[in-house]
Amino acid sequence: MWLVILAFAATIATAIWYTQAENDKYLLKFLSLMLWGTTIMVLVDHALPFLMEGGGEFFEITTEAMVLGGVMLIAALGVWEGALLIKDPKGVIYKRKHA
């Protein structure tokens, strides 16, 4: 389930970034790449045991899997927020003096 949650979030982030690509001051490209990287990592994590064990369960639909997907999504959004705070696109944290 966490693969589905992350892939859905990556798709939404990519679509939003693509519509705002000319002016990416909120680092949506960074968010999109981070979510796609995590999605690919989880896909490999699911695919290798599935192929090596000769089948079985590919999508884990449990409460723990949903919680893990949510936690991974929150962690990715937290890293993105941290990058936004460092960049400070609106100049709220670091007041810029205009000459």
Image (cartoon, rainbow, N blue to C red):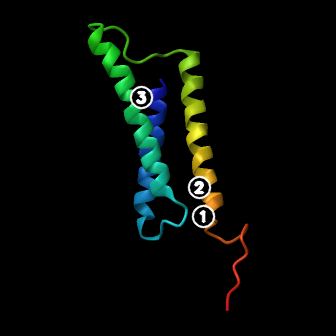
Q: Are marks 2 and 1 in contact (CB under 8 Å)?
A: yes
CA gap, disc 2 and disc 1 = 6 Å
Residue 38 image offset from top left, x and y in percent: 44, 36
Is there CB contact under 8 Å for labels 3 and 1? no
Q: Which mark is residue 42?
A: 3
Residue located 48% across and 41% down the image: 9
Question: Which residue: 73% across, 66% down?
Answer: 93
In the displayed structure image, the side of residue 62 where residue 88 appears, left or right: right
User: Crowding at label 3, few (<14), some or many (≥20) Cα neighbours within 10 Å?
Assistant: some
Q: Which residue, as the protein is rendered here, is positioned at the far bottom? A: 99
Question: Of callouts 3 and 1, which one flags the residue occurring earlier in the amino acid sequence?
Answer: 3
The Cα atoms of the two marked residues, 3 and 2, are separated by: 23 Å
Characterize the local packing of mark 1: few (<14), some (14-19) or many (20 or more) Cα atoms within 10 angstroms. Answer: some
Type of amino acid under label 2: Ala
**Left or right: 43 in relation to 34:** left
Residue 11's spot in the image, x, y percent? 41, 44
In the image, residue 34 lies at what x, y percent? Answer: 46, 45
Q: Amino acid at mark 3?
A: Val
Q: Which residue is mark 2?
A: 83
Question: What mark, if any, has residue 13 been given in the picture?
Answer: none
> Horizontal and vertical percent for residue 80?
57, 50
Q: Which residue is identified by label 1? A: 87
Residue that appears at 60% across and 24% down: 67
* Badge 1 amino acid: Lys
- Viewer-nearest of discs 3 and 2: 2
Does residue 7 appear anywhere in the picture?
no
Vertical order, 84 against 95 (above or below): above
